[in-house]
Amino acid sequence: MKVIIMGCGRVGAEVALMLEQEGHEVTVLDSDPAAFGPLGYLSEEFRGIRMVGNGVDQDALRHAGIEQADAFVSATRGDNRNVMACQIAKHVFNVPRVVSRVFDPIREEMYRSLGLRTINPTRIQARLLKEALEKEEEEPVSAGPGAREEI
Amino acid sequence: MYVIVVGAGKVGYYLAKELVEEQHEVLVIELDAARCASITEELGEIVMQGDGCEASTLERAGVGRCDMIIAVTGDDEDNLVVCQVARHRFQVPRTVARVCNPKNEEIFKRLGIDTTVSATSVIMAHIEQELPTHPLIPLMTLKGGGLEIVEVKVPAESFVVGKPIRDILLPHQSLISLVIDTEGHPRIPTGETVIRAGDEVVAVTMRESEAALRMALTSSKGMGLPGSP
């Protein structure tokens, strides 16, 4: 599968490496060249394509090969950039699989109702944190192997 | 009319000012506190501080009863989202977005934004009008269908000079709908109308046929297709 990932932050870099190691053809797009530098998050093991470009610019997307892409993921910090890029991928370039990260739950709900596939980290993380807290009350969380006995 | 303007940069400021002068009810939404303060100072209590992309901000602004929302921040993606949230969540009847990248105009229209304004496109159109190397000027794009109305100035060396329209070979789905002579007199053409050097020809064409149409009306060889007179 040919995948374009927009945004090379922690999440974008992680998804890129995971997919690339599973044998997919991955291109990572970020508007900041420093994202691919020594201070960036992308592992040196990543053998896909690193490309500097603005994902809400259709010329940059074309340059990244969006016309042949099977999937597009947007994971920048900006909700608006993410939903705009995904809408371009879906409606202009007809990419079959498009997923957008959207932090704002209200915007996420709206774009989902408009037919975009969205992931809302805010709700997911809040739920996970709450579940972790609730578990702690029932059973003490282990500090490591053998730690429980010491308690 | 109740108009909400999102973004109080230079464009937003002058737009709000003009709208207030024309007696409209105006609310400007701006994120930056200092900018809000200076506009309040100059134009009065017409500013609300907040992020216009957030549904809660728009709700506080009374977006439900507004007649038009105009997004004029400096970022195309923000302007798109403001208009989409206003349209889909609050059923605002008319949405207008400023776009910086002219290529986004078509995308925005496809995504349901009623009107887009691109300073880049406007300036480009002016440049194209001035430059002799751009004899074809796009006048307007018709919604849907990929049709455009364009204007072509016929140069003296053109193959079509002195020919009646019925003898001119035009690309597929192109139609000459108006001929304006050098004195500025417009004529609705028939097949008998003869094209003269310096005439401005207004034609309807498919976007893909633009280049061929320009060639047909300006080149000294016409369209150069087999069978051309």
Image (spheres, rainbow, N blue to C red):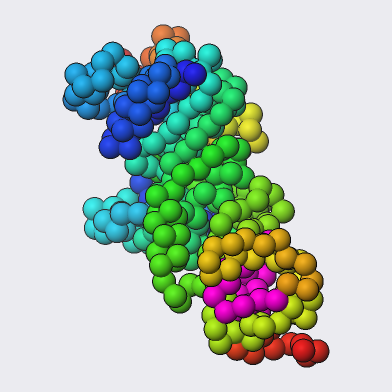
Q: Check residue B214 for magenta coloring.
A: yes
Placement of B139 over or under B191, stated as above or below:
above
Query: Where is residue B164 shown, x and y percent of the image?
Result: 74, 78
Placement of A22 over or under B190, stated as above or below:
above
Residue at left 53%, top 21%?
B67
Residue B150 in sight from this viewpoint = no
**From the viewer's perspective, is B81 left or right of B43?**
right
Residue at left 41%, top 9%?
A137
Q: Check residue A124 for magenta coloring.
A: no
Query: Quadrant of the image for the C terminus of chain B?
Result: bottom right
Q: Which residue is at the front of the view, B15 or A35?
A: B15
Placement of B109 over or under B20, stated as above or below:
below
Query: Where is residue B190 shown, x and y percent of the image?
Result: 77, 67
Residue sticking out furthest to the top: A137
Occupied quadrant, residue A3: bottom right
Residue B44 in sight from this viewpoint = yes
Query: Where is residue B45 shown, x and y percent of the image?
Result: 28, 13
Occupied quadrant, residue B206: bottom right
Q: Which residue is at the front of the view, A8 or B29?
A: B29
Residue at left 79%, top 71%?
B191
Query: Where is residue B3 shown, x and y percent of the image?
Result: 45, 22
| Picture mark count | 0
Residue at left 40%, top 64%?
B127
Read off the magenta span: B194-218
Q: Which residue is at the front of the view, B173 or B50?
A: B173
**From the viewer's perspective, is B41 left or right of A27?**
left
Q: Which residue is at the front of the view, A43 or A52?
A: A52
